[in-house]
Image (cartoon, rainbow, N blue to C red):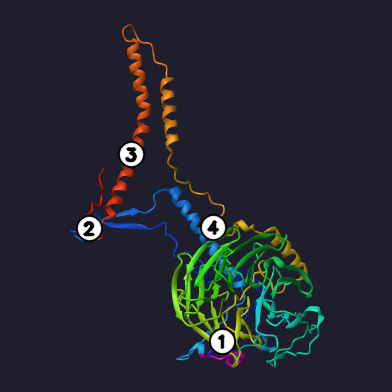
């Protein structure tokens, strides 16, 4: 067995020359190409005679593939651009992405899901082993967790009133808060000899149940779903807002691109509130009863809710009707998670099945046996499932979206897992359970290289302010939430022309008759300009003007008669329907 270092080992970047930077291997470049490049100098050989297959030039004809010089030049320029872009991408990967992802490497008949956390901790370095710990707080559980987008800060909420914000980079407690500054004498136990919490906060207690917690756009603000109302706190533990309109909230989600706080309460009401202006964007009833399963799709911002009837509904704030209604399980839905690419959804139900769905076709890709109370996808596509005190991690290693067992972990007997959540940019899985919270190592879970423009774990206060202003300027309106966001900016296709009504058709005929009557007839020679002939010509012009409109009306009536005749034939008894005409005649 070999456990690669969690999140890999950085390459050495010191004292490199321009030649070394420009030097990339063909294999590195080939990974970013669109396949083999087109060879524009190829000649095609065509055999003209199969009677005598000798090598004489008379039996062969040589044809050039591209004869247009202009087209050939354009294609050559395009292929050159493809090659340059592939080489630039290979350079960026080599020098700007210095960290390689970790993974578990099993030897022989050994299985990766049999490798224990103790074995992994012995193989990794000291800094990675510190990320594996258990915080035992038996008086406040069960706990639910949430991470910031950079993975540096974690919010922990105990059901019995404990709230804490933790800086995971230096393992310091920024704030532990309890309402009314009520000190209590409960001590947390840290089960890992390598872990040392440097910060110490005043232990404070919220005198009511906390059902869920979620960070807002950064670590400075977070929302907590308490017993009666929804509260917003800052990082110092100061209560900023009490949102009574949301009611007794069960689950929370934050849409970071739209600055919308979504919640569902115990009456099945879904609320969307803009945290920048405080405006309630929309509020409506789902009509499907109480639900504590709520998840946001990171691809399009659509909210999905799981219900007791086995259905998963997808919502957007501008519509009270669900965008999609899927029957996923023959029983209540217990867990829901979206892949980071937004095209894969995992659901778990009381029918003891875990299903993977392709959201582009709304079809089941894979059905796995097992029950799960909570689900979560990692940045690299690993799926964590948990029920009772057992955690199972599934992985797609073939690239065919067929998940198989990758790792497993059992908590201490009696621990009931409430929530699992992968820490971004780290190979770490956070576990909230009835006795506190824990952290275990899952090699290959996190993205090894972060983009400082998207999420920077080492950002300063100045960078955070600039990022906050930039994200507010780039804020998307609620109307931009839809199933297929690529449709934004496209031209809507023309609708089918509606059939004109009887009054509109009569008005068209009258207008055509009036136009035909207003036509001036030429004056002919003597004997050809009689009044009777003029009346006859004018009548012929009126008939010509009315003919296309009358023909169109007759065609519509014939089609209606055919449809009526077909419906009458289909109303025959089932035993006689096979004798009915397939194409009815008028």
Front position among marks 4 and 1: 1
The residue lying at 26 percent from left, 47 percent from top is 584
Q: How far apart are marks 4 and 2 (CA)?
A: 50 Å
Name the spot of residue 542 as percent of width and height, x first: 37, 24
- Numbered mark located on residue 388 in the image: 1
Mark 3: give few (<14), some (14-19) or many (20+) Cα within 10 Å: few
Instruction: Measure how far apart labels 2 and 3 are at the Cα level.
Output: 30 Å
Q: Which of marks 2 and 1 is in front?
A: 2
Against 402, is 488 above or below? above
Mark 4 or mark 1: name the one nearer the start of the chain. Answer: 1
Toward which corner of the image does residue 133 lie, by quadrant? bottom right
* Mark 1: secondary structure: loop
Sequence-wise, which precedes: disc 3 or disc 4? 4
Q: What element carries label 4?
A: helix
Q: Position of residue 476 (x, y in %)?
A: 64, 58
Q: Does the magenta stretch include residue 299?
A: no
Q: Name the residue under label 3.
A: 555
Q: Toward which corner of the image does residue 266 lie, by quadrant?
A: bottom right
Q: Mark 4 points at which residue?
A: 486
Give the spatial CA distance, label 4 vs label 1.
Answer: 40 Å
Can residue 7 be spotted in the picture? no
Magenta range:
114-122
- The residue beneath circle 2 is 576
């Amino acid at each position: 067995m070999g456990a690669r270092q969690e999140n890999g080992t950085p390459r050495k970047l010191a004292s490199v020359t321009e030649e070394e930077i420009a030097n990339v291997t063909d294999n590195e470049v080939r990974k970013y190409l669109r396949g083999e490049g087109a060879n524009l100098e190829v000649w095609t050989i065509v055999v003209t005679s199969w009677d005598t297959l000798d090598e004489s030039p008379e039996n062969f004809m040589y044809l050039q593939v591209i004869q247009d010089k202009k087209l050939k030049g354009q294609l050559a320029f395009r292929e050159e651009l493809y090659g340059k872009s592939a080489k630039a991408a290979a350079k960026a990967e080599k020098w700007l992405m210095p960290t390689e992802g970790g993974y578990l490497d099993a030897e022989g008949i050994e299985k990766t899901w049999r490798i224990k956390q103790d074995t992994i901790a012995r193989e990794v370095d000291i800094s990675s082993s510190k990320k594996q710990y258990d915080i035992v707080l038996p008086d406040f559980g069960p706990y639910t967790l949430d991470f910031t987008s950079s993975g540096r800060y974690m919010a922990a909420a105990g059901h019995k009133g404990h709230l804490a914000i933790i800086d995971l980079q230096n393992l310091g407690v920024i704030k532990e808060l309890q309402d009314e500054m009520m000190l209590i004498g409960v001590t947390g136990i840290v089960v890992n000899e390598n872990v040392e919490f440097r910060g110490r906060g005043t232990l404070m207690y919220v005198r009511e149940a906390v059902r869920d917690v979620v960070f807002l756009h950064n670590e400075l603000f977070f929302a907590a779903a308490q017993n009666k109302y929804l509260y917003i706190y800052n990082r110092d533990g100061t209560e900023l807002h009490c949102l009574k309109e949301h009611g007794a909230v069960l689950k929370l989600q934050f849409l970071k691109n739209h600055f919308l706080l979504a919640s569902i309460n115990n009456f099945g009401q879904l609320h969307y509130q803009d945290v920048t202006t405080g405006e309630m964007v929309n509020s409506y009833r789902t009509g499907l009863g109480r639900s504590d399963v709520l998840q946001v799709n990171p691809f399009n911002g659509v909210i999905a809710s799981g219900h007791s009837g086995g259905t998963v509904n997808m919502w957007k704030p501008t519509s009270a009707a669900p965008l999609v209604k899927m029957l996923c399980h023959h029983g209540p839905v217990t867990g829901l998670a979206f892949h980071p690419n937004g095209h894969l959804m995992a659901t778990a139900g009381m029918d003891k099945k875990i299903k993977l769905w392709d959201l582009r076709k709304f079809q089941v890709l894979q059905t796995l046996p097992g029950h799960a109370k909570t689900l979560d996808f990692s940045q690299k596509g690993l799926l964590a499932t948990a029920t009772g005190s057992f955690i199972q991690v599934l992985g797609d290693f073939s690239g065919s979206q067929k998940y198989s067992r990758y790792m497993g972990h059992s908590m201490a007997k009696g621990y009931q897992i409430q929530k699992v959540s992968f820490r971004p940019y780290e190979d770490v899985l956070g576990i909230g359970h009835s006795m506190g919270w824990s952290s275990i190592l899952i090699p290959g879970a996190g993205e090894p290289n972060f983009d400082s423009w998207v999420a920077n774990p080492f950002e300063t206060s100045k960078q955070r302010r600039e990022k906050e202003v930039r994200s507010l300027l780039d804020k998307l309106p609620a109307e931009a939430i839809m199933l297929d966001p690529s449709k934004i900016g496209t031209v809507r296709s023309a609708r089918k022309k509606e059939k004109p009504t009887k009054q509109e058709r009569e008005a068209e005929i009258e207008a055509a008759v009036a136009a035909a009557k207003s036509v001036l007839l030429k004056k002919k020679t003597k004997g050809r300009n009689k009044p009777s002939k003029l009346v006859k010509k004018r009548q012929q012009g009126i008939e010509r003007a009315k003919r296309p409109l009358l023909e169109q009306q007759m065609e519509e009536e014939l089609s209606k008669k055919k449809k009526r005749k077909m419906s009458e034939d289909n109303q025959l008894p089932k035993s006689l329907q096979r004798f009915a005409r397939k194409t009815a005649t008028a």
